[in-house]
Every structure is written in structure tokens, then in C-alpha cells.
Amino acid sequence: MLNDKTVVLGVSGSIAVYKAADLASKLTQAGAKVNVIMTESATRLVAPLTFHSLTDRPVVTSMWQAREAGIGHITLADTADIVVIAPATANTIARLAAGIADDMLTATVLATRAPVIIAPAMHTNMFRNQITQDNLARLRARGFTIVGPARGRLASGATGEGRLVEIGEIIDAIEKTLQKSADLSGKRIVVTAGGTQEPIDPARHIGNRSSGKMGFALAEAARDRGAEVTLITAPSHLPEPGGVAVVRVTTAAEMKAAVAKAVKQADALIMAAAVADYQPKSRAQAKIKKQSPEMTLELVRTPDILSEVTGSFIKVGFAAESEDLVANAQKKLKQKGLDLIVANDITEPESGFGADTNKVTMIDKEGNAESLPLMSKREVAERILDKVAGMGENPP
Ligand code: CTP
């Protein structure tokens, strides 16, 4: 797995830095090209020459020294198959979470498209501090893998959480992540996102509270796992993910047409969009003026995109429910001819519309139900893609 892979090993200034030398050595022995980037404080604890001797490659200690060595400021980011930061101090984690790029390590992480693994090491109080916890949650939500920390004796002499995990555990995480980063390679995945808007007149529409976050997280996660992704999105304020073909639509009818076109080549369709079920029977050409105290708007059904789309690709739907979650989702799975349905209870706090987190139950067509705990939408996306990747080995 590691042979010929380019690994950026970021080393920040924790007393556990000496263990990173062992990691650099093991990765090199396994055939990886290991590009070490040290923060300034790491160089106070271990000499760059140690890493240079173990990896037989240049070691970067600052943006300027890299430049002098002929290494551009994003070269290491571009060429990495994976970035591993071990040990990662509370300070480095905070800088990464804030998107700061004031040294070669943080600039590389900000610029890379490769997966990133973080192995924290710090004093227990720093680790338990809500600020560090929030920073780690933020990175996790962006798709970073956090390994550890472990419990044990710390540099201060105290015992607690904060020790760098064993090197073997970091190598396992690297191998698993590398495997995952390619498990959808060459697959074409269509994802829908956001809430459709059905116009009433030039000023108004019928909409819903979907933010698009779940669909965007799916598109980003699928891209990071090597898939060629088309994201068909109803209006959303989220920034467009790079490396994804984005198709913008407004109504259910437009989404249907875009899906029909995109699935021709697809291996999987994941419908995370909240599609309006009804649209105004006719759209007024001019703004409707207020007249009588009551007004009736005549609505007609929109197309059911998932039920109507055909083809030999994996079909994944969502079920937004406010009661009888599993039973209702199972019914939808059958009615819409799906391989997998992801049910979420939209009445749960921190779950569903607009939230950054989601709590879902995944049900496959064999009737197996798996309830996941509350997690970031990115993590939910990864779990859904684990299922899709598994089905891809035995396509429907
Ligand atoms: N869906 C669709 N076309 C529609 C409505 C929904 O493709 N016109 C898709 C959604 O993207 C989702 C799944 O069908 O993947 C279920 O959507 P949901 O809103 O939960 O269910 P509905 O089919 O609309 O049923 P109901 O509103 O009665 O619960």
C-alpha cells in the first residue's frame, strides 16, 4: 500500500517529536517517499538532519529554506498522496482549523487535495479544552482523520489523555486512508443537493429549509475518494467544491432533466436534494398583487425524480421523516426501487435541515438497518460512500 506513495510527514513541536523519526523510518522502509516538513519549534527538539538521514530526502523547515532548495510553496501539497501530521500540537491544530498558512506545514495542508491525518499530542488540559475540541471537530468535518491521542504518561509527569498514539496505529490509519482515497477511483457519481424552488410569480417561490450541506459533503467526499462527481444543486449559498462538475438548477423539473442527462454515464446516483413535491399549477408572469383577504394557490405534483429515473446504476435516496422513521424509509426504499436509503429524523436537534451534523439510519434493500450516532455531515457522507463502494464491487 505504501510502496511508491508520496507521504508528507508534518512534524510539530511536541516532546513526542522523537517518535516521528521512527514513523519516518518505517514509512521509508515500506517504500514511501517521505517529505518531512518541520515547524520551527520542532527543529528545536530534533535536528532536521535526523529526518534527512532516515528518509534520504530534503527536509523542509521554512517556506524560505524550501524555496532555496527549489521546492515551491505548494509543490509538496500537489505531489502528496497523503499528509500526516504527527505529532500535531494544539497550536498546529488551531492554525489548521483557522485556515492559517504562515509556515510551510500549514500552507501545504491548506493547499493539498490529498487526505490529511492528524495525530495529536499535548497536555491533557490542552486536549480537553473546548477550544481544541472545537478545532478538532472542525477539521473532522472537513474530512480530516484524527488518530488518538492515547492515555498514558505525559511529559509533565502526569497521566492522562494526550499521548501520541503508537506508531503502528498511525501507519494503520495511513494505509486505511490510502485505500479509501482510491476506492471510488474511476467511478462516476451523481449527487443532488439543496431544496428546489417552485416559482409562484417573478418574486416568490415555494421552497424548503434544505441548505445543501449533506449533498455538498457527499460530493466532496466522493471526489476525495477518486470519483468523477457531478453535483446537481438547487439554489444553495455554499461555495462550489473544486474538482466537481456543478450543475445549477432551480425547480424539480429542471433537476429531473439534469439528473436524466447525468446518469447516462453514472455508476451511482445519490439524491440528497429536498425536492418539492408540489409546484404551482401556473406561474404568474407579473407579481401577484394582494386583493381579497384569502387566496388559494393551486398546486400540482412535481415529478418524482428518483422513482422515474432508470438505468443500471446504484440508486441511493434520503428519507426526511418526522415520525415512524424506519417504517416510512423502508416504504420509500421499495417504492422508489432503491439500493440504499438514508433516513433522518428532521425533528431531532442538530440533525437534518441546515445543521452541520446529522443522525441517520441507513437501510439497504435486504432490510439491514444501521443507525449511526450524531456525526458531521462529512462523516455521514463517508459512511454512505463506504456502502456505495461495497455495492460497486457487486453492482446491481
Ligand atoms: N425525491 C425525488 N423527487 C421528488 C421528491 C423526492 O427524487 N419529487 C427524492 C428525494 O431526493 C429523496 C427521496 O426521494 O432522496 C425521498 O424524499 P422525501 O422528501 O423524504 O420523500 P417523498 O418521496 O417526497 O415523500 P413524502 O414527502 O410523502 O414523505
Image (cartoon, grey):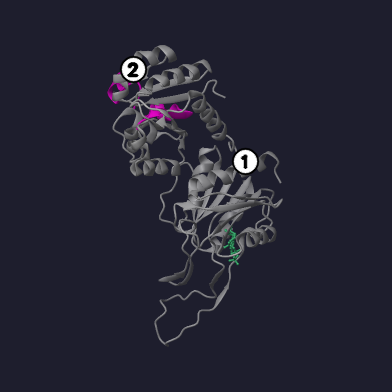
Distance Cα–Cα, label 2 vs label 1 = 42 Å
Q: Quadrant of residue 259?
A: bottom right
Residue type at mark 2 is Val
Q: Would residue 245 be visible to someone looking at this image?
A: no
Task: Please report the bounds of the magenta region as a residue range.
Answer: 61-89
Considering the numbered disc 1 on the image, is that residue within a helix, a strand or a loop?
helix
Compared across the picture, whether 192 is left or right of 367 comes to left
Q: Quadrant of residue 254?
A: bottom right
Residue 369 place in picture, x, y as percent: 65, 51
Residue 11 place in picture, x, y as percent: 37, 25
Quadrant housing the N terminus: top right
Q: Is residue 123 magenta?
A: no
Q: Quadrant of ligand 1?
A: bottom right
Residue 33 place in picture, x, y as percent: 47, 19
Residue that sits furthest to the front in the current view: 158
Q: Which residue is mark 2?
A: 46
Residue 251 place in picture, x, y as percent: 51, 63
Q: Residue at x 41, y 52 (%)?
A: 238
Q: Residue at x 42, y 76 (%)?
A: 286
Residue type at mark 1 is Ala
Q: Residue at x 37, y 41 (%)?
A: 135
Compared across the picture, whether 107 is left or right of 226 comes to left
Viewer-nearest of discs 2 and 1: 2
Q: Is residue 241 above or below residue 278?
A: above
Look at the numbered discs 2 and 1 and tell me whether their residues touch, using CB distance below 8 Å. no
Crowdedness of circle 1 by 10 Å Cα count: few (<14), some, many (20+)? many
User: Residue 389 shows which numbered tag?
Assistant: 1
